Protein backbone atom coordinates (compact mmCIF):
# COMPACT_ATOMS: atom_id res chain seq x y z
CA UNK A 1 0.00 0.00 0.00
CA UNK A 2 1.10 3.57 -0.71
CA UNK A 3 2.40 5.54 2.26
CA UNK A 4 3.64 9.05 2.94
CA UNK A 5 7.43 9.30 3.17
CA UNK A 6 7.29 10.56 6.75
CA UNK A 7 3.84 9.63 7.98
CA UNK A 8 2.30 11.05 11.11
CA UNK A 9 0.27 8.67 13.27
CA UNK A 10 -3.00 10.36 14.19
CA UNK A 11 -4.80 9.36 17.36
CA UNK A 12 -8.47 8.49 17.71
CA UNK A 13 -9.20 11.38 20.02
CA UNK A 14 -11.95 11.62 22.60
CA UNK A 15 -15.20 13.22 21.54
CA UNK A 16 -18.31 14.58 23.18
CA UNK A 17 -21.44 12.60 22.44
CA UNK A 18 -24.87 14.27 22.53
CA UNK A 19 -27.68 13.52 24.92
CA UNK A 20 -30.80 12.05 23.37
CA UNK A 21 -32.40 15.49 23.57
CA UNK A 22 -29.44 17.16 21.83
CA UNK A 23 -29.37 14.49 19.13
CA UNK A 24 -33.08 15.00 18.56
CA UNK A 25 -32.53 18.71 17.93
CA UNK A 26 -29.49 18.19 15.67
CA UNK A 27 -29.33 18.70 11.94
CA UNK A 28 -27.88 15.20 11.55
CA UNK A 29 -31.11 13.63 12.78
CA UNK A 30 -33.38 15.97 10.87
CA UNK A 31 -35.27 14.50 7.88
CA UNK A 32 -34.15 15.39 4.35
CA UNK A 33 -35.88 15.17 1.00
CA UNK A 34 -34.01 13.13 -1.60
CA UNK A 35 -35.93 13.50 -4.84
CA UNK A 36 -39.35 11.90 -4.36
CA UNK A 37 -38.58 10.30 -0.98
CA UNK A 38 -37.75 11.50 2.51
CA UNK A 39 -34.98 10.04 4.65
CA UNK A 40 -35.61 10.17 8.40
CA UNK A 41 -32.10 11.42 9.10
CA UNK A 42 -29.08 12.76 7.25
CA UNK A 43 -27.01 9.68 8.03
CA UNK A 44 -25.83 7.48 5.19
CA UNK A 45 -24.02 4.17 4.82
CA UNK A 46 -22.18 4.19 1.46
CA UNK A 47 -21.85 1.10 -0.72
CA UNK A 48 -19.26 -1.40 0.52
CA UNK A 49 -18.49 -4.71 -1.18
CA UNK A 50 -18.57 -7.54 1.42
CA UNK A 51 -17.70 -10.46 -0.92
CA UNK A 52 -20.68 -12.54 0.12
CA UNK A 53 -22.62 -13.20 -3.11
CA UNK A 54 -22.46 -16.47 -5.03
CA UNK A 55 -19.96 -16.84 -7.85
CA UNK A 56 -22.94 -16.28 -10.16
CA UNK A 57 -23.90 -12.99 -8.50
CA UNK A 58 -26.95 -14.15 -6.56
CA UNK A 59 -27.95 -12.95 -3.11
CA UNK A 60 -26.92 -15.36 -0.34
CA UNK A 61 -27.97 -15.73 3.26
CA UNK A 62 -24.68 -14.06 4.16
CA UNK A 63 -25.71 -11.04 2.06
CA UNK A 64 -29.06 -10.88 3.83
CA UNK A 65 -27.40 -11.11 7.24
CA UNK A 66 -24.87 -8.42 6.30
CA UNK A 67 -27.51 -5.86 5.29
CA UNK A 68 -29.84 -6.87 8.11
CA UNK A 69 -27.07 -6.01 10.56
CA UNK A 70 -26.65 -2.51 9.13
CA UNK A 71 -30.42 -1.99 8.96
CA UNK A 72 -30.79 -2.70 12.68
CA UNK A 73 -28.78 0.45 13.31
CA UNK A 74 -31.37 2.50 11.38
CA UNK A 75 -29.24 4.82 9.24
CA UNK A 76 -31.24 7.29 7.19
CA UNK A 77 -30.01 5.68 3.96
CA UNK A 78 -28.24 2.39 3.32
CA UNK A 79 -26.66 1.83 -0.11
CA UNK A 80 -26.21 -1.75 -1.31
CA UNK A 81 -22.80 -2.68 -2.71
CA UNK A 82 -21.66 -2.07 -6.29
CA UNK A 83 -23.90 -4.41 -8.28
CA UNK A 84 -23.02 -5.36 -11.85
CA UNK A 85 -25.38 -4.21 -14.59
CA UNK A 86 -24.28 -6.83 -17.11
CA UNK A 87 -25.07 -10.51 -17.16
CA UNK A 88 -21.42 -11.54 -17.09
CA UNK A 89 -19.26 -13.41 -14.59
CA UNK A 90 -17.83 -11.19 -11.87
CA UNK A 91 -17.08 -13.51 -8.97
CA UNK A 92 -18.87 -13.20 -5.60
CA UNK A 93 -20.28 -9.73 -6.36
CA UNK A 94 -23.99 -9.01 -6.65
CA UNK A 95 -25.44 -8.70 -10.14
CA UNK A 96 -28.57 -7.15 -11.57
CA UNK A 97 -28.01 -7.84 -15.29
CA UNK A 98 -30.97 -10.22 -15.74
CA UNK A 99 -34.47 -10.64 -14.34
CA UNK A 100 -33.44 -13.88 -12.63
CA UNK A 101 -31.64 -11.77 -10.01
CA UNK A 102 -34.80 -9.91 -8.99
CA UNK A 103 -36.19 -12.46 -6.48
CA UNK A 104 -33.00 -12.49 -4.42
CA UNK A 105 -32.72 -8.71 -4.49
CA UNK A 106 -36.38 -8.43 -3.49
CA UNK A 107 -35.64 -10.64 -0.50
CA UNK A 108 -32.76 -8.31 0.41
CA UNK A 109 -35.13 -5.32 0.29
CA UNK A 110 -37.63 -7.10 2.52
CA UNK A 111 -34.88 -8.03 4.96
CA UNK A 112 -33.73 -4.42 5.34
CA UNK A 113 -37.28 -3.10 5.68
CA UNK A 114 -38.07 -5.63 8.39
CA UNK A 115 -34.83 -5.10 10.31
CA UNK A 116 -35.08 -1.29 10.25
CA UNK A 117 -38.86 -1.40 10.79
CA UNK A 118 -39.19 0.87 7.77
CA UNK A 119 -36.89 3.57 9.15
CA UNK A 120 -34.09 3.16 6.57
CA UNK A 121 -34.23 4.09 2.89
CA UNK A 122 -32.53 1.49 0.70
CA UNK A 123 -30.71 2.36 -2.52
CA UNK A 124 -28.60 0.07 -4.69
CA UNK A 125 -25.41 1.12 -6.44
CA UNK A 126 -25.22 -0.12 -10.02
CA UNK A 127 -21.92 -0.41 -11.85
CA UNK A 128 -20.29 -1.37 -15.12
CA UNK A 129 -16.69 -2.48 -15.29
CA UNK A 130 -14.30 -3.53 -18.02
CA UNK A 131 -12.09 -6.59 -18.20
CA UNK A 132 -9.10 -6.83 -15.84
CA UNK A 133 -6.81 -9.88 -16.05
CA UNK A 134 -4.32 -11.24 -13.56
CA UNK A 135 -0.65 -10.40 -13.95
CA UNK A 136 0.85 -13.21 -16.06
CA UNK A 137 4.10 -15.04 -15.64
CA UNK A 138 6.71 -13.43 -17.88
CA UNK A 139 7.23 -16.54 -19.99
CA UNK A 140 3.50 -17.02 -20.42
CA UNK A 141 3.02 -13.42 -21.51
CA UNK A 142 5.58 -13.61 -24.28
CA UNK A 143 4.59 -17.13 -25.38
CA UNK A 144 0.81 -16.59 -25.48
CA UNK A 145 -0.30 -12.98 -25.15
CA UNK A 146 2.09 -10.70 -27.00
CA UNK A 147 0.95 -10.10 -30.57
CA UNK A 148 4.21 -9.82 -32.47
CA UNK A 149 4.18 -7.31 -35.32
CA UNK A 150 6.63 -5.59 -37.65
CA UNK A 151 6.80 -2.76 -35.12
CA UNK A 152 8.55 -5.10 -32.70
CA UNK A 153 10.91 -6.40 -35.41
CA UNK A 154 11.93 -2.90 -36.48
CA UNK A 155 12.45 -1.84 -32.86
CA UNK A 156 14.64 -4.90 -32.22
CA UNK A 157 16.68 -4.21 -35.33
CA UNK A 158 17.31 -0.68 -34.06
CA UNK A 159 18.00 -1.67 -30.44
CA UNK A 160 20.42 -4.46 -31.37
CA UNK A 161 21.86 -2.84 -34.53
CA UNK A 162 21.08 -6.13 -36.29
CA UNK A 163 18.92 -5.82 -39.42
CA UNK A 164 18.23 -9.58 -39.38
CA UNK A 165 15.46 -8.89 -36.86
CA UNK A 166 13.39 -7.28 -39.64
CA UNK A 167 12.56 -10.74 -40.98
CA UNK A 168 12.65 -12.75 -37.75
CA UNK A 169 9.87 -15.25 -37.12
CA UNK A 170 7.50 -14.53 -34.25
CA UNK A 171 8.83 -17.39 -32.12
CA UNK A 172 12.35 -15.97 -32.26
CA UNK A 173 11.08 -12.51 -31.25
CA UNK A 174 9.18 -13.98 -28.31
CA UNK A 175 12.17 -15.98 -27.09
CA UNK A 176 14.46 -12.97 -27.25
CA UNK A 177 12.07 -10.64 -25.45
CA UNK A 178 11.40 -13.19 -22.72
CA UNK A 179 15.11 -13.08 -21.83
CA UNK A 180 15.64 -9.37 -22.51
CA UNK A 181 16.42 -6.84 -19.74
CA UNK A 182 13.92 -4.12 -18.86
CA UNK A 183 15.74 -1.36 -20.74
CA UNK A 184 15.35 -3.35 -23.98
CA UNK A 185 11.70 -4.13 -23.30
CA UNK A 186 10.98 -0.46 -22.68
CA UNK A 187 12.34 0.37 -26.15
CA UNK A 188 10.53 -2.46 -27.96
CA UNK A 189 7.15 -2.78 -26.25
CA UNK A 190 4.61 0.01 -26.24
CA UNK A 191 3.01 1.45 -23.10
CA UNK A 192 0.01 -0.88 -23.12
CA UNK A 193 2.14 -3.98 -23.72
CA UNK A 194 4.37 -3.07 -20.79
CA UNK A 195 1.28 -2.55 -18.65
CA UNK A 196 -0.08 -5.96 -19.61
CA UNK A 197 3.24 -7.63 -18.80
CA UNK A 198 3.81 -5.88 -15.48
CA UNK A 199 0.27 -5.43 -14.18
CA UNK A 200 -1.96 -7.72 -16.25
CA UNK A 201 -4.12 -6.89 -19.25
CA UNK A 202 -6.75 -4.24 -18.57
CA UNK A 203 -9.30 -2.73 -20.92
CA UNK A 204 -9.55 1.05 -21.16
CA UNK A 205 -12.50 3.11 -22.41
CA UNK A 206 -10.10 4.48 -25.03
CA UNK A 207 -9.45 1.06 -26.64
CA UNK A 208 -11.23 2.08 -29.83
CA UNK A 209 -9.71 -0.83 -31.77
CA UNK A 210 -11.97 -3.16 -29.78
CA UNK A 211 -15.53 -3.17 -31.17
CA UNK A 212 -17.20 -3.75 -27.79
CA UNK A 213 -15.32 -0.78 -26.31
CA UNK A 214 -16.05 1.41 -29.30
CA UNK A 215 -19.75 0.60 -28.98
CA UNK A 216 -20.08 1.34 -25.24
CA UNK A 217 -21.95 4.62 -25.82
CA UNK A 218 -24.54 2.77 -27.86
CA UNK A 219 -25.13 -0.11 -25.43
CA UNK A 220 -24.58 1.19 -21.89
CA UNK A 221 -27.62 3.50 -21.60
CA UNK A 222 -30.06 0.65 -22.12
CA UNK A 223 -28.03 -1.74 -19.94
CA UNK A 224 -28.12 0.69 -17.02
CA UNK A 225 -31.78 1.48 -17.67
CA UNK A 226 -32.72 -2.20 -17.55
CA UNK A 227 -30.76 -2.63 -14.32
CA UNK A 228 -32.57 0.34 -12.77
CA UNK A 229 -35.90 -1.15 -13.82
CA UNK A 230 -35.00 -4.36 -12.03
CA UNK A 231 -34.00 -2.38 -8.94
CA UNK A 232 -37.40 -0.72 -8.89
CA UNK A 233 -39.19 -4.02 -9.44
CA UNK A 234 -37.21 -5.51 -6.53
CA UNK A 235 -38.48 -2.72 -4.27
CA UNK A 236 -35.41 -0.52 -3.77
CA UNK A 237 -36.13 3.13 -2.99
CA UNK A 238 -33.63 4.25 -5.59
CA UNK A 239 -30.44 3.62 -7.51
CA UNK A 240 -26.99 5.16 -7.29
CA UNK A 241 -25.15 5.24 -10.62
CA UNK A 242 -21.51 4.39 -9.96
CA UNK A 243 -19.45 6.96 -11.85
CA UNK A 244 -16.48 6.84 -9.45
CA UNK A 245 -13.12 5.16 -8.94
CA UNK A 246 -11.63 2.79 -11.53
CA UNK A 247 -14.68 1.68 -13.46
CA UNK A 248 -16.27 2.29 -16.84
CA UNK A 249 -18.28 5.44 -16.28
CA UNK A 250 -15.47 7.07 -14.32
CA UNK A 251 -13.23 6.24 -17.27
CA UNK A 252 -15.47 8.27 -19.56
CA UNK A 253 -15.49 11.22 -17.15
CA UNK A 254 -11.71 11.14 -16.71
CA UNK A 255 -9.49 13.79 -18.28
CA UNK A 256 -7.42 10.85 -19.55
CA UNK A 257 -10.31 9.94 -21.86
CA UNK A 258 -9.21 11.10 -25.32
CA UNK A 259 -11.74 9.24 -27.44
CA UNK A 260 -12.32 10.96 -30.81
CA UNK A 261 -15.96 9.94 -31.28
CA UNK A 262 -17.54 12.78 -29.32
CA UNK A 263 -17.32 10.92 -26.01
CA UNK A 264 -13.84 12.05 -24.98
CA UNK A 265 -11.64 15.11 -24.90
CA UNK A 266 -13.35 18.27 -23.57
CA UNK A 267 -15.37 18.03 -20.34
CA UNK A 268 -18.69 18.37 -22.13
CA UNK A 269 -17.83 15.38 -24.33
CA UNK A 270 -16.54 13.29 -21.43
CA UNK A 271 -19.81 13.68 -19.54
CA UNK A 272 -21.94 13.01 -22.61
CA UNK A 273 -22.29 9.26 -21.98
CA UNK A 274 -22.84 9.65 -18.21
CA UNK A 275 -25.71 12.03 -18.98
CA UNK A 276 -27.11 9.73 -21.67
CA UNK A 277 -27.04 6.85 -19.21
CA UNK A 278 -28.87 8.98 -16.64
CA UNK A 279 -31.47 10.07 -19.19
CA UNK A 280 -32.12 6.45 -20.20
CA UNK A 281 -32.46 5.44 -16.55
CA UNK A 282 -34.75 8.35 -15.76
CA UNK A 283 -36.98 7.60 -18.75
CA UNK A 284 -37.25 3.96 -17.66
CA UNK A 285 -37.90 4.37 -13.94
CA UNK A 286 -39.84 7.64 -14.08
CA UNK A 287 -39.62 10.90 -12.19
CA UNK A 288 -41.05 9.38 -8.99
CA UNK A 289 -37.99 7.22 -8.35
CA UNK A 290 -34.64 8.21 -6.82
CA UNK A 291 -31.67 8.29 -9.20
CA UNK A 292 -28.42 9.57 -7.71
CA UNK A 293 -24.76 9.46 -8.63
CA UNK A 294 -21.44 8.63 -6.96
CA UNK A 295 -18.49 10.43 -8.57
CA UNK A 296 -15.03 11.71 -7.74
CA UNK A 297 -14.12 15.07 -6.24
CA UNK A 298 -10.54 14.41 -7.42
CA UNK A 299 -9.01 11.47 -9.30
CA UNK A 300 -5.61 12.09 -7.63
CA UNK A 301 -3.64 10.91 -10.66
CA UNK A 302 -1.38 12.82 -13.07
CA UNK A 303 -3.42 14.18 -15.96
CA UNK A 304 -6.69 13.18 -14.32
CA UNK A 305 -9.70 15.13 -13.10
CA UNK A 306 -9.32 17.51 -10.21
CA UNK A 307 -11.67 19.74 -8.25
CA UNK A 308 -12.47 22.13 -11.10
CA UNK A 309 -13.64 19.18 -13.20
CA UNK A 310 -15.72 17.79 -10.34
CA UNK A 311 -17.37 21.18 -9.80
CA UNK A 312 -18.34 21.26 -13.47
CA UNK A 313 -19.70 17.71 -13.32
CA UNK A 314 -21.57 18.36 -10.09
CA UNK A 315 -23.37 21.40 -11.46
CA UNK A 316 -24.27 19.62 -14.70
CA UNK A 317 -25.45 16.50 -12.86
CA UNK A 318 -27.69 18.68 -10.71
CA UNK A 319 -28.95 20.50 -13.79
CA UNK A 320 -29.75 17.17 -15.46
CA UNK A 321 -31.93 16.15 -12.51
CA UNK A 322 -29.97 13.70 -10.40
CA UNK A 323 -31.61 13.38 -6.97
CA UNK A 324 -28.37 13.34 -4.98
CA UNK A 325 -24.63 13.75 -5.48
CA UNK A 326 -22.36 11.45 -3.46
CA UNK A 327 -18.66 12.30 -3.52
CA UNK A 328 -15.61 10.10 -3.24
CA UNK A 329 -11.95 10.58 -4.11
CA UNK A 330 -9.26 8.60 -5.96
CA UNK A 331 -9.29 4.81 -6.17
CA UNK A 332 -7.72 4.51 -9.64
CA UNK A 333 -5.82 1.86 -11.58
CA UNK A 334 -3.37 4.34 -13.08
CA UNK A 335 -1.21 4.67 -9.95
CA UNK A 336 -1.89 1.26 -8.42
CA UNK A 337 1.03 -0.78 -7.16
CA UNK A 338 2.26 -3.74 -9.18
CA UNK A 339 0.44 -6.94 -8.20
CA UNK A 340 2.14 -10.24 -7.61
CA UNK A 341 2.17 -12.72 -10.48
CA UNK A 342 -1.21 -14.44 -10.59
CA UNK A 343 -3.05 -11.56 -8.93
CA UNK A 344 -5.06 -8.72 -10.46
CA UNK A 345 -4.15 -5.09 -10.06
CA UNK A 346 -6.09 -3.43 -7.22
CA UNK A 347 -7.04 0.24 -7.65
CA UNK A 348 -6.65 1.22 -4.00
CA UNK A 349 -2.90 0.61 -3.54
CA UNK A 350 -1.50 3.88 -4.93
CA UNK A 351 -1.79 7.42 -3.64
CA UNK A 352 -5.23 7.74 -5.21
CA UNK A 353 -6.24 4.63 -3.29
CA UNK A 354 -4.96 6.11 -0.06
CA UNK A 355 -7.01 9.25 -0.64
CA UNK A 356 -10.07 7.08 -1.18
CA UNK A 357 -9.62 5.27 2.14
CA UNK A 358 -7.10 7.23 4.24
CA UNK A 359 -5.61 5.69 7.36
CA UNK A 360 -4.29 7.09 10.63
CA UNK A 361 -0.79 7.00 9.11
CA UNK A 362 -1.18 10.25 7.24
CA UNK A 363 0.23 13.72 6.65
CA UNK A 364 -0.46 16.76 8.81
CA UNK A 365 -4.04 16.95 7.51
CA UNK A 366 -4.91 13.49 8.78
CA UNK A 367 -7.58 11.04 7.62
CA UNK A 368 -10.66 12.49 9.30
CA UNK A 369 -12.99 14.19 6.84
CA UNK A 370 -10.06 14.59 4.49
CA UNK A 371 -12.27 15.12 1.41
CA UNK A 372 -14.78 17.47 3.05
CA UNK A 373 -13.22 20.70 1.69
CA UNK A 374 -13.61 19.36 -1.86
CA UNK A 375 -17.19 18.31 -1.18
CA UNK A 376 -17.92 21.75 0.26
CA UNK A 377 -16.60 23.47 -2.87
CA UNK A 378 -18.78 21.28 -5.10
CA UNK A 379 -21.86 21.87 -2.95
CA UNK A 380 -21.24 25.61 -2.97
CA UNK A 381 -21.03 25.64 -6.78
CA UNK A 382 -24.18 23.52 -7.11
CA UNK A 383 -26.09 25.82 -4.77
CA UNK A 384 -24.74 28.97 -6.45
CA UNK A 385 -26.03 27.59 -9.75
CA UNK A 386 -29.51 27.52 -8.24
CA UNK A 387 -29.82 23.83 -7.37
CA UNK A 388 -30.66 22.30 -3.98
CA UNK A 389 -29.57 18.75 -4.87
CA UNK A 390 -28.45 17.00 -1.66
CA UNK A 391 -24.69 16.44 -1.47
CA UNK A 392 -23.23 13.51 0.49
CA UNK A 393 -19.82 13.78 2.17
CA UNK A 394 -17.92 10.59 3.00
CA UNK A 395 -14.43 9.61 4.10
CA UNK A 396 -13.16 9.44 7.67
CA UNK A 397 -16.34 10.65 9.34
CA UNK A 398 -16.83 8.91 12.67
CA UNK A 399 -18.16 11.19 15.42
CA UNK A 400 -21.34 13.13 16.01
CA UNK A 401 -19.42 16.37 16.54
CA UNK A 402 -17.63 15.97 13.24
CA UNK A 403 -20.74 15.04 11.23
CA UNK A 404 -22.92 17.73 12.79
CA UNK A 405 -20.27 20.40 12.16
CA UNK A 406 -20.04 19.41 8.48
CA UNK A 407 -23.80 19.86 8.12
CA UNK A 408 -24.04 23.00 10.25
CA UNK A 409 -21.22 24.64 8.28
CA UNK A 410 -23.01 23.93 5.01
CA UNK A 411 -20.21 21.72 3.70
CA UNK A 412 -22.61 18.89 2.87
CA UNK A 413 -26.26 17.95 3.31
CA UNK A 414 -25.73 14.33 4.39
CA UNK A 415 -22.91 12.63 6.30
CA UNK A 416 -21.73 9.21 5.10
CA UNK A 417 -20.21 6.63 7.44
CA UNK A 418 -18.62 3.62 5.72
CA UNK A 419 -15.77 2.16 7.78
CA UNK A 420 -17.30 3.60 10.95
CA UNK A 421 -20.60 1.86 10.20
CA UNK A 422 -18.70 -1.38 9.59
CA UNK A 423 -16.97 -0.96 12.96
CA UNK A 424 -20.32 -0.32 14.67
CA UNK A 425 -23.52 -0.75 12.65
CA UNK A 426 -25.47 0.54 15.67
CA UNK A 427 -23.74 3.95 15.62
CA UNK A 428 -26.89 5.71 14.40
CA UNK A 429 -29.30 4.40 16.98
CA UNK A 430 -26.77 4.58 19.84
CA UNK A 431 -26.08 8.25 19.17
CA UNK A 432 -29.76 9.07 18.69
CA UNK A 433 -30.56 7.51 22.08
CA UNK A 434 -27.83 9.50 23.81
CA UNK A 435 -25.60 6.46 24.24
CA UNK A 436 -22.72 7.51 22.03
CA UNK A 437 -20.21 6.50 24.68
CA UNK A 438 -21.07 2.91 23.75
CA UNK A 439 -20.02 3.41 20.10
CA UNK A 440 -17.22 1.17 18.85
CA UNK A 441 -14.93 3.73 17.17
CA UNK A 442 -13.23 2.88 13.88
CA UNK A 443 -9.45 3.02 14.21
CA UNK A 444 -8.85 3.56 10.46
CA UNK A 445 -6.12 0.96 10.02
CA UNK A 446 -7.82 -0.50 6.90
CA UNK A 447 -7.86 -4.08 8.10
CA UNK A 448 -11.17 -4.29 6.24
CA UNK A 449 -9.66 -2.90 3.05
CA UNK A 450 -6.91 -5.53 3.09
CA UNK A 451 -9.59 -8.23 3.16
CA UNK A 452 -11.33 -6.57 0.22
CA UNK A 453 -8.08 -6.52 -1.73
CA UNK A 454 -7.71 -10.26 -1.15
CA UNK A 455 -11.35 -10.81 -2.25
CA UNK A 456 -12.14 -12.30 1.16
CA UNK A 457 -15.33 -11.68 3.13
CA UNK A 458 -14.96 -8.27 4.75
CA UNK A 459 -15.10 -7.94 8.53
CA UNK A 460 -13.75 -5.51 11.15
CA UNK A 461 -10.82 -6.25 13.44
CA UNK A 462 -12.70 -4.60 16.32
CA UNK A 463 -15.23 -7.42 16.48
CA UNK A 464 -14.46 -10.34 14.14
CA UNK A 465 -12.59 -12.33 16.82
CA UNK A 466 -14.94 -11.36 19.63
CA UNK A 467 -17.17 -13.97 21.36
CA UNK A 468 -16.47 -16.63 18.75
CA UNK A 469 -18.19 -19.18 20.96
CA UNK A 470 -21.50 -17.33 20.76
CA UNK A 471 -24.18 -19.87 19.74
CA UNK A 472 -25.50 -19.61 16.18
CA UNK A 473 -23.06 -17.07 14.78
CA UNK A 474 -21.66 -17.43 11.25
CA UNK A 475 -17.88 -17.71 11.03
CA UNK A 476 -15.17 -18.11 8.42
CA UNK A 477 -11.51 -19.14 8.30
CA UNK A 478 -12.19 -22.32 10.27
CA UNK A 479 -14.07 -20.44 12.94
CA UNK A 480 -11.41 -17.79 13.52
CA UNK A 481 -13.51 -14.85 12.28
CA UNK A 482 -17.14 -14.03 12.84
CA UNK A 483 -18.96 -12.53 9.84
CA UNK A 484 -21.17 -10.04 11.68
CA UNK A 485 -20.75 -7.51 14.44
CA UNK A 486 -22.09 -8.67 17.81
CA UNK A 487 -25.65 -7.62 18.54
CA UNK A 488 -25.99 -4.52 20.68
CA UNK A 489 -27.63 -5.33 23.96
CA UNK A 490 -29.42 -2.02 24.33
Image (spheres, rainbow, N blue to C red):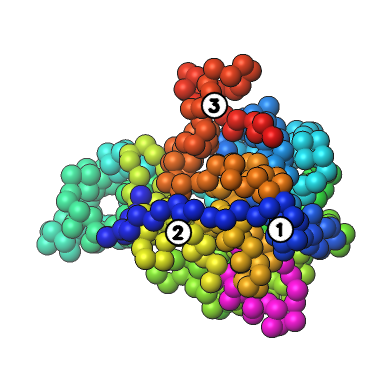
Q: Residue furthest left?
A: 161
Q: Is residue 383 magenta?
A: yes
Q: Position of residue 50 (x, y in %)?
A: 57, 38
Does residue 169 appear left or right of residue 421 in this picture? Answer: left
Numbered disc in front, either 3 or 1:
1
User: For mark 2, what is the residue?
Assistant: 367
Q: Residues within 10 Å of mark 1 (few under 14, many from 20)?
A: some
Q: Position of residue 299 (x, y in %)?
A: 48, 65
Label disc, if present, on residue 22 of the rendered structure:
1
Decide if residue 156 is in sight here.
yes
Q: Is residue 245 magenta?
A: no
Mark 3 to mark 1 CA distance (whole Å): 35 Å
Task: State whether residue 471 is above or below residue 150.
Answer: above
What span is in magenta?
374-393
In what element is the residue under mark 2? loop
Looking at the image, which residue is at 22% across and 44% down? 178
Q: Residues within 10 Å of mark 3 (few under 14, many from 20)?
A: many
The quadrant in which the C terminus is found is top right
Q: Position of residue 489 (x, y in %)?
A: 67, 31
User: For mark 3, what is the residue?
Assistant: 482
Amino acid sequence: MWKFKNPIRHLITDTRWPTAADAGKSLLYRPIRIGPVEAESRTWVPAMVPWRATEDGFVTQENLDWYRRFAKGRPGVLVVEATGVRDISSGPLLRIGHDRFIPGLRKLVETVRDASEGHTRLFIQIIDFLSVKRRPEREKYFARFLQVSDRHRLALAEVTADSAWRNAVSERVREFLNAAPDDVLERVLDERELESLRFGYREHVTDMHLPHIRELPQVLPNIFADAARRAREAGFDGVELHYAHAYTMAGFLSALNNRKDGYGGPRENRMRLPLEVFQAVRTTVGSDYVVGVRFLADEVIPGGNHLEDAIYFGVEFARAGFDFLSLSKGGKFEDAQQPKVGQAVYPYTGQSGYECMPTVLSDEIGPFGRSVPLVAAIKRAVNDAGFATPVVATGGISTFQQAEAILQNGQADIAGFARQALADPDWFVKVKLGRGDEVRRCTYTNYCEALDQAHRPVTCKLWDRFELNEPGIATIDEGRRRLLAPEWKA
